[in-house]
Image (spheres, rainbow, N blue to C red):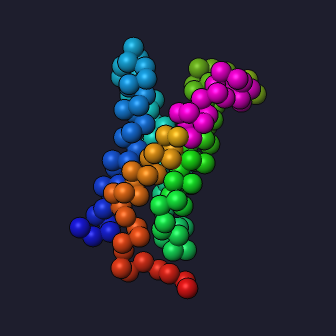
C-alpha cells in the first residue's frame, strides 16, 4: 500500500477513537455523545492534524515520538476549544464561555482524557500511515 493510501486511511480511522470514547464515557447521551466526539476528533484532525502532517513531512520529522508529542498538545488545545464552543452553542457570551472552559471541573479533564486522546489519535495515525517508511520522503540532511 502506498503512503498516500495509508495516509487517507489514517486520516479517516485515527480520529474515530474520540467519538468511540465519548460514546463509552457517556452512553446516556447516545447519539449526542457520538456527534460531539466526532466533531472533536475530526475537527481537531482537520484543524491541527492536516497542517502538521504537511509540515512534519516537509521537515522529515517522521518519528513516532514527534507524532505523539504533537498529538498530546493538540488534544489539550482541542479539549479547551471544544469547551468554549460548547458554551457558546448553549448561548453563553464569549467571556463566560472562556471562564467556564478553564474552571476546575472542566480543566481537570484536560490531561485525561483531552491530551491523552490526542496522543492516542496521533499514535494510531502514525501506526497506519507509517511516514517513517516512505522511501520518497523529503529529508533535508
User: Is 93 situated left or right of 74 in this image?
Assistant: right
The residue shown at (44%, 47%) is 121
Which contiguous range is marked in magenta? 98-115
Which residue is farthest left?
A: 1
Residue 14, image x and y in percent?
Answer: 38, 48
Please state which of residues 108 and 40 is positioned toward the viewer in this rendering.
108
The reply to whether the magenta stretch includes residue 2 is no
What residue do we see at 53% from left, 70% from top? Answer: 61
Is residue 30 something that shows in the picture? yes
Left or right, residue 81 beside residue 34: right
101 within the magenta span: yes
| Relative image position of residue 141 (x, y in whole percent) | 55, 85
Figure quadrant of residue 3: bottom left
Q: Residue at x 38, y 80 (%)?
A: 136
Q: Quadrant of residue 55?
A: bottom right
93 or 51, which is in the foreground?
51
- Magenta span main SS: helix
Amino acid at each position: 500500500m502506498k503512503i498516500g493510501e495509508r495516509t487517507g486511511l489514517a486520516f479517516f480511522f485515527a480520529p474515530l477513537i474520540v467519538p468511540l470514547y465519548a460514546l463509552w464515557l457517556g452512553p446516556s447521551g447516545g447519539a449526542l455523545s457520538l456527534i460531539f466526539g466526532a466533531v472533536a476528533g475530526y475537527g481537531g484532525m482537520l484543524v491541527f492534524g492536516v497542517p502538521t502532517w504537511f509540515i512534519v513531512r516537509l521537515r522529515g520529522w517522521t518519528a513516532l515520538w514527534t507524532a505523539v508529542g504533537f498529538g498530546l498538545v493538540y488534544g489539550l488545545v482541542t479539549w479547551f476549544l471544544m469547551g468554549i464552543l460548547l458554551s457558546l452553542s448553549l448561548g453563553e457570551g464569549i467571556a463566560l464561555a472562556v471562564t467556564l472552559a478553564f474552571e476546575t471541573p472542566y480543566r481537570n479533564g484536560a490531561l485525561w482524557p483531552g491530551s491523552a486522546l490526542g496522543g492516542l489519535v496521533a499514535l494510531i495515525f502514525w501506526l497506519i500511515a507509517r511516514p517513517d517508511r516512505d522511501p520518497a520522503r523529503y529529508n533535508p540532511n
